[in-house]
Structure formats: structure tokens, C-alpha cells
Image (cartoon, grey):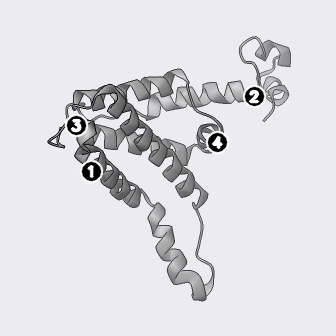
Amino acid sequence: MTIRSLAAELGVAPMSLYRHVRDKDDLLNEVVDRLLARAWRPRTDQGNWRAWVTEAADNLRRFLVTQPAALHVYLQHPVVSHSAITRMEAMLEVLRSAGADEAAARRAYGAIHTYTVGFAALEASRAGWTPPGEATGGVAFQLATYTTPRQFAVGLRYLLDGIEGHPRTFGVTGRA
């Protein structure tokens, strides 16, 4: 896609689009922001921090896997769009409400976010992949099972267990 082809599709002059966006990347960032706004919010009550964080992370993973342009944006640069910042602030608030101080909440958010984006990238890259031949098929198939939505949930549970159990995250007891 180019700005020129988009303008032609819309029946406008290319320069008229530049009144609204700087370039193609700016336009793509705006589209991703609007899609993200509809995709990330959990339905779970924020009072159950683990369930809320799990649903928020899985919603982002699913969004990135099903929207290749969004995954591309997330892998190119830190996403600081309105929806991404809203998502981050909501997650930080849930973590702080569970008992994490500001620094611990930010570290926990960073770990969860990095795990989610990285897992989505690996999952998306293996979509439609089939193991090669019989000789390596068994091992390859086993490795492929590490990039399923179920495995994402297992890994996220391990990560949240570590966050919850870390004394500097939720205090000496290790429980929120």
C-alpha cells in the first residue's frame, strides 16, 4: 500500500491525505491504534488482578496474531499510541491495586508485555507451518506445540507466579 494508491482508492488527491497523516507509517499506526482500542479490554473484574492481566495479555496476543499489520508495528518500534498507553496505564493500575509499588508494577508490566509480543511474533511466524519429513517431524512437531494459545497461557501463568511470588512486587508475603 502506498499513500498514492490509497488516495486513488478513496478518489482524492494524495496531498489531501497528507493533511491528516505524515506518511504511510503514521497511517498504519493510526489504524493499529483504532483496532487495538476495540481488541484489548478484558471483561474480567479488575479486582481479580491475575484473571484481568491474563485476559488483557491474551487479548493482545490474539490481536497481534490475527492482525499482521499490528504485529509489524509492534515489532518495528515501541507503540505509544493512545490505545497502547491506555492499555499500559490500566494494567499498571491493576498491578498497583494488587499491592505492587510503582517500580514493581512497571517491571511486571514490562515482563508481561514483552512476553506477550514475543510469543505473538513466534506464534504468527509459525501459522500454517507443517513439520518437514519423518526424520525431524517428531521433534519439530513437539517444538511447534510450544507456540499455541494453550502454551501461551501456561507460560503466562509461570510468569505471573514469579511476579506474584517475588517479595519486591507484592511485599513480604508474596501474595496480593
Q: Nearer the viewer, mark 3 or mark 4?
A: 3
Q: Earlier in the sequence, mark 1 or mark 4?
A: 4
Query: In x, y percent, where is residue 102?
Result: 33, 26
* Nearer-the-camera pick, 142 or 10: 142
Q: Amino acid at mark 2?
A: Lys
Query: In x, y percent, where is residue 82?
Result: 51, 21
Is label 2 in contact with label 4 (beta carbons under 8 Å)?
Answer: no
Q: Nearer the viewer, mark 1 or mark 3?
A: 3
Q: Amino acid at mark 4?
A: His
Position of residue 14 in the picture relative to residue 170 (left or right):
right
Q: Amino acid at mark 3?
A: Phe
Query: In x, y percent, where is residue 110?
Result: 44, 38
Q: Which residue is mark 2?
A: 24
Quarter-of-image position of residue 58? top left
Is label 2 in contact with label 1 (beta carbons under 8 Å)?
Answer: no
Screen quadrant of the C terminus: top left
The residue at the point 27 percent across, 50 percent down is 161
Q: Nearer the viewer, mark 1 or mark 4?
A: 1
Q: Which residue is mark 1?
A: 161
Query: In x, y percent, where is residue 154?
Result: 34, 58
Q: What is the C-alpha distance between the residues marked 2 and 1?
A: 41 Å
Task: Judge the density around disc 4: few (<14), some (14-19), many (≥20) Cα neighbours within 10 Å.
Answer: some
Whether residue 25 is visible: yes
